[in-house]
Amino acid sequence: MAGAPLNRSKKDLVATGINSAVVIVVVLVAFFTAPIRTAELTPASSEYENYGELTAVPDALQETARVPESSPALAPIAASGLAVGYDGHTLRGYTPQGTEAWAYSRDDELCALSSAWGKAVATYHTNVGCGDVVAIEASTGKYAGTRSSNAPDEVVSVSSAERVGTVGALRTELWRSDLVRTVEYGEVEAPQEADMQPNPGCMITSALTSTDLLAVTEVCSDTTWLRFQETTPEDSRGPEIRANATVSSGAVLVGISEHTAAVYDPTTEEVLGIDDAGVEVARSKVEPIANIDALYEPAIKKLPEHESFFDGNNLLLMQPDTLAVQTIYQGALGTGIAVDNKLLYPVDGGIAVADWTAQTVERTIPVDRGEYTGEVSLASVGDAIVEKRGDELVFLR
């Protein structure tokens, strides 16, 4: 009879109770083992002003502070005029004076670190691979977003002013400022969704992104491809490919602009500029690039009038439209920064000041690095230049 109570046996009640208990246990286990519960955030005591970047080339520099830094980032991370470093399972924000502004600690291994939107974006390895992501507002040290999804166990960072993500051999992801995924490409969680991924079974070797463009190199069977994609397709699960181009075996990305990608061809030792229609628009002879990993993360830096790439021995400046190599600064130790329409880049004994229009080096600001002889990369926070020297950040003012 409609509306009559259900007749439930004792067995039904016992089964319901068992099911409810199992659900409660699962929820409690998930809650108490969630990675975020192992984290400790110590935000800034008050919001810091945006210190911006250096506006005038200094006459001299003096070391004012140094702090440990062991993140996988290729250059110092800067956001909202603060530097961000990592050591001992702790992420820290630093003022231009090198004093700690905030700290975020957790036991998980850090996979990647980058910045965008005034935030530090850290990717950690958990039971889902390198797929647990935390964004922290640099000026306050407060949570700005989190996300978690299955990901490869080894990734490198990819970022622009508009997007941040990770690149693995089988999968590339991009996220927008609220950490919502806008692109997933490669091996996905739901391969049963027909026709969503256009090139399954390939191995990704490099990826770079600009405002609206994602470029990926990958090996499919015996062919190496360069793929141009939208950074904001209609459905994040379905990549929107602008163009495909075949490139030489071992070719990897070394630069990107709004409509062009720069690819290093190891067979000819050239940098090729290829536009997002798949057409070659530039070809530049360069010195051989050594130590290209199977999953390659190029040391690049966007400058006001150039894209730049450090090849391990030289700093290459490329025109922003075709990515033709315009200038090669030999003897560089890493990527540089732009200050008052000048290029500042690290060299033995100091920081070189170059005029990129005249393609000349004007002078070198002395910097005493003691016995350190490895790579150096630069960032600007407020009135300080920050050098990343191996496992340290060094503040120069």
Image (cartoon, grey):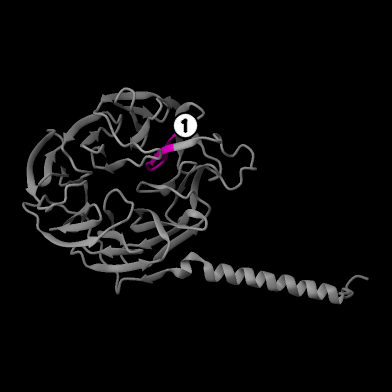
Task: Please say whether residue 53 is one of the residues in the magenta stretch.
Answer: no
Q: Main secondary structure of the magenta part?
A: strand
Q: Position of residue 35 (x, y in %)?
A: 48, 65
Answer with left or right where residue 81 lies relative to residue 1.
left
Q: Position of residue 116 (x, y in %)?
A: 35, 53
Q: Position of residue 208 (x, y in %)?
A: 38, 40
Three-letter amino acid code of the residue under disc 1: Val
Residue holding disc 1: 219
Q: The C terminus appears in which quarter of the rendering? A: bottom left
| Range of residues picked out in magenta | 205-219
Foreground pick, 1 / 134: 134
The answer to whether residue 221 is above or below residue 372 is above
Foreground pick, 218 / 261: 218
Answer with left or right where residue 81 lies relative to residue 104.
left
Q: Quadrant of residue 313?
A: top left
Q: Element under label 1? A: strand
Answer with left or right where residue 114 lies relative to residue 83.
right
The answer to whether residue 273 is above or below residue 175 is above
Task: Please say whether residue 207 is one of the residues in the magenta stretch.
Answer: yes
Q: Residue at x 58, y 69 (%)?
A: 29
Mark 1: few, some, or many residues within 10 Å (few <14, many ≥20)? many
Answer with left or right where residue 329 lies relative to residue 4.
left
Foreground pick, 365 / 373: 373
